[in-house]
Image (spheres, rainbow, N blue to C red):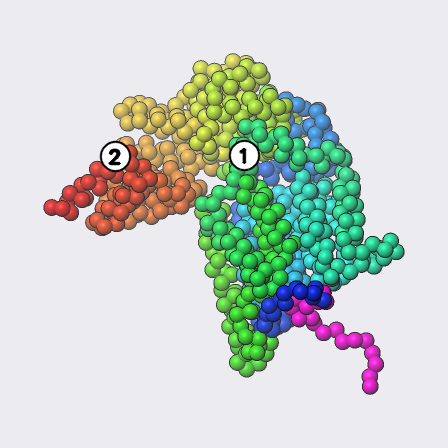
Amino acid sequence: MKHGPPSRKRPAPNAGPRPAPKPGARPSRALALAPPPDLRHPAFLIAALVAAACIAVTVTFVLYDTDMWQHLAVGRAIYALHAFPTRQLWTWPTYGATDVNASWGFRFLIWPIWKSAGIWGLFAWRWATTLATFALLFAAARKMGARGLAALIILVWCALVYRQRSQIRPETLVAVLLAAEIWILEMWRAGGRDRRPWLILIALLWANAHISYWLGLAVQGIYLVAGRGDPRAAASPLFARLRLAGWRVPFAVLIASALISLVNPWGFAALWQPFEYFLYWRHEPIFQTIGELQPLDWHYNRQNGLPILIVLWIALMVWRARRVRFDGVEALMFALVGGLSLPTERFLGFFAVVAAPFMARDLDAWTRSRTPASSGPGIHFTGEKGRGLWIRAAAVSILCVLIATPEWLRPGTPLGIGIDWGGHPVRACDFMESHGVRGHGMNQFAEGGYQLYRFWPDRSRLPFIDIHQTGTRDDRYLYAYAQTDSSAWRYLDNKYRFDYAVLYTNQNPKDRLLDFLDTDRAHWALVFSDDAAAVFIRREGPLAAIARDTEYQALPAGNAGTAILGRCSVDTTLRRRLERELERSEAESPWNARAKTLRAALVVLDGRTAQALQLLDQAIAQKPIALIAYKIRERIDLAIGRPREAMSDIRRAIGIEGTTSLLAGEMGRAYAGLRDTGHARDWYRRALGIDPANAAARDSLAALEGRGAR
């Protein structure tokens, strides 16, 4: 008889010591799971590589987030000052006030990457953090019992939801920390090596990287509460001398994590920020206008399958509770991230991270429960069974690509390595620099990050407000109301007497500030405008000469000002002046889809249809989500008898804006142009269903029905 160490056989899925049944307890319903494939088999490895490639491609889209620039600017300042700034150095109205910068750790890391490697460095950060996150989640899922190929599909699917939060933001670092925390806790739950002391280090890093540090503590609390009676929660060797076991170990780690979170440059003030937001700031008007703080946009998230993902997760939880056992950790984690993600989009990335390992485990168990264990799929690698594994691996690989493709083709986030420069005030800042524009400026916070990046530490060109909505409470209120109320704008302007304004030209339908300055040309001169920003200069004061020499007299900056096109239809002198100014605007910036679109509308009035279509094609090539360009082009196509081309533009517009009554009516016109009266009638009815007051659709439908009756 041989003596030696016990064999280290791989445990079966969900294996581990089980408690003795309590007297009178109902016996659990056993599951006959098919044996999983070997992770080392080439078929599995190839499928895993395809899934990893899909995840990497998913986050390889052009960067458009405006917050990135302030992260880079503050990171640069940390290195330049050789200190972590604790004073407000980023906006001019409150310059020098106490400032809490909870994301300093991320900014400290990202600046040298950008400085040394540029755009490729930023994308390397995205790839590295995303792949690390989902690799840790895959490892956690395997510790939880997921062994099959189905887990790869879930990882790719969750990456599609995570995608919209994968800009150069602190959340990309936090996602790695959250995934690592889940992996450590699931390893402990599975009876593996106890790495819970690492959670203390994660808490330290998290508190110095992002204000969402409390989420890591909440996850620890969930595992503490739901895992308290788990028989696999053995005593940790590290705490053996203290005789701590079971729930006392995670409680000690949780307390230590909370205490070490205080080790940051601002102490408790940094930890109080998320609670201050919840109790006070979120009720302020300015925070209610921020896109990522709005409720979940279900229309946008249909393409990545989020609604189906949520329903599937709930169904899998119910199935697991009935067929295996109720997992309290999973239920509480779902309640935590679901409760955070539905009221606001900011936490959607965390939802995807948390969902991935639990759904991977549950879907793997469900799929293997559908296959008889006696058939042993995936355990034999030769003959018919081996071919079966290769076929399934190929099917999973193809499915990963198929479910990701619609999101990859989303017009607003085109695949590629680069920055959407047309969304940042690059040329506006160039104009300010070349013409000596300085003083006390007004800006919208979306523009503040890049302005800070370009001009810090020049205090004469710092923004009025930055991406964190820095300012006094009164100024935040005035700023928010100034976007929609002209009297609030005048009050704010009288308070500070701004020398210039840099305003976002990608105008929100509710924002009217551009229109207020457009109509106040007696005091303000428009001197620059492109797809990212418009620059206005006060006519009286130190910049008066610049305003006089560089102003646009006819070009509107805001959407309301485009009503000038109606006057141009009868005033040829005004038409020529506006066309010249649009040509100047195009020459001053390469990001000028708006100017090209407006010029197309002008040249149509002269009968230059071919030139108009050429300008619209150029505008759409520059800005694939140029809604107005699609609308103008489809109307031209209908007017010159090209209904099929018009239908293509209408579909693109619907993809951007959704189905409106106007677009439905235009689709009806296009089908009528093809003499397809059935579809035309359906679309006219759809238009009236959305807006019964759509007279054009009502008259067109009546004409069709009258013709059909005859």
- Counting from the top left corner in percent of width and height, residue 124 is at 62, 51
Horizontally, is 643 left or right of 94 in the view?
A: left
Horizontally, is 18 left or right of 557 in the view?
A: right
- Counting from the top left corner in percent of width and height, residue 463 is at 60, 27
Does residue 12 belong to the magenta stretch? yes
- The magenta span reads 1-19
Q: Farthest residue toward the bottom?
A: 1
User: Which residue is nearer to you in this view: 634 or 28?
Assistant: 28
Q: Which residue is mark 2?
A: 695
Prevailing secondary structure of the magenta residues: loop
User: Which residue is nearer to you in this view: 289 or 435?
Assistant: 289
- Counting from the top left corner in percent of width and height, residue 16 is at 71, 67
User: Which residue is nearer to you in this view: 79 or 211?
Assistant: 211
Residue type, label 2: Ala
Label 1 crowd bin: few (<14), some (14–19), many (20+), radius 10 Å: few
Residue type, label 1: Ile
Q: Is residue 212 visible?
A: yes
Q: Which residue is mark 1?
A: 290
Horizontally, is 114 left or right of 446 in the view?
A: right
Q: Is residue 111 visible?
A: no
- Counting from the top left corner in percent of width and height, residue 603 is at 31, 33
Quadrant of the snapshot with the N terminus: bottom right
Q: Farthest residue toward the left?
A: 710
Between the residue at mark 2 and the residue at mark 1, the CA separation in whole angstroms equals: 36 Å
Q: Quadrant of residue 287?
A: top right
**Residue name at image x 49 percent, y 63 percent:** 399
